[in-house]
Image: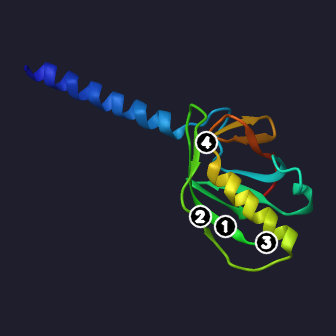
Amino acid sequence: MTRISKALAAVVLVAVGLGALTGCSSDAGGSLDGTNWKLTGWTLNSLNPADFTITAGFAAGKISGNSGVNSYSGPYAAGSDGSFSIGPLASTAMGGPEPAMRAESAYVTLLGQAASYKVSGSVLTLYDANGNESLIFGTTAGP
């Protein structure tokens, strides 16, 4: 290979690598980074999310908020193709009223099952692996 060919090959490899990284960091329908949400709807009919304080805030690759009784945080990933996932969550371990504990358990389960997302105006919707809506949030000023 000539010196120019090697240099061109290096530039192409760097450009492809940067393109891949850029694709991983952008979000479908808008960036989640720096946004805060309150749960307004979910697939459960037995519990009304308005009866609980369930929030999600996104910053620097981390999700955090209140899951009904406890505070939680952990890593998340949101892809330009609308893919969504969370890593292991850390949580406080306080007890609360039985309905709030049931709501918290359901929320954490649905959040863990989220496979894609969409931001439409002031609404964030998380979908399960089958493309069904599972968690619906409205914007808030803070988690």
SS at badge 2: loop
For residue 96, above or below residue 80: below
| Tag of residue 89 | 2
Q: How far apart are labels 4 and 3 at the CA level?
A: 24 Å
Quick one: SS at disc 1?
A: strand
Instruction: Name the residue beneath numbered marker 3.
Output: 69
CA–CA distance in space, label 4 to label 2: 16 Å
- Please tell me whether mark 1 or mark 4 is closer to you in this view: 4
Q: Position of residue 94 (x, y in %)?
A: 73, 80
- Residue topped by disc 1: 72
Give the residue type at disc 3.
Val
Residue 115: give its label: 4
Spatial CA span between label 2 and label 1: 6 Å
The numbered mark, 2 or 3, whose residue comes first in the sequence reads: 3
Distance in Å between CA atoms under marks 1 and 3: 10 Å
- Find the distance from the CA under tag 1 to the CA under tag 4: 19 Å
The image shows residue 140, relative to residue 14, as above or below, that is below
* N-term-proximal mark, 1 vs 4: 1
Disc 4 is placed on an element classified as loop
**Where does residue 121 sit, x and y in percent of width and height?**
80, 35
Which quadrant is the N terminus positioned in?
Answer: top left
Instruction: Kindly indicate whether the residue at mark 1 contacts the one at mark 2 (C-beta within 8 angstroms).
Output: yes
Give the quadrant of the C terminus.
bottom right
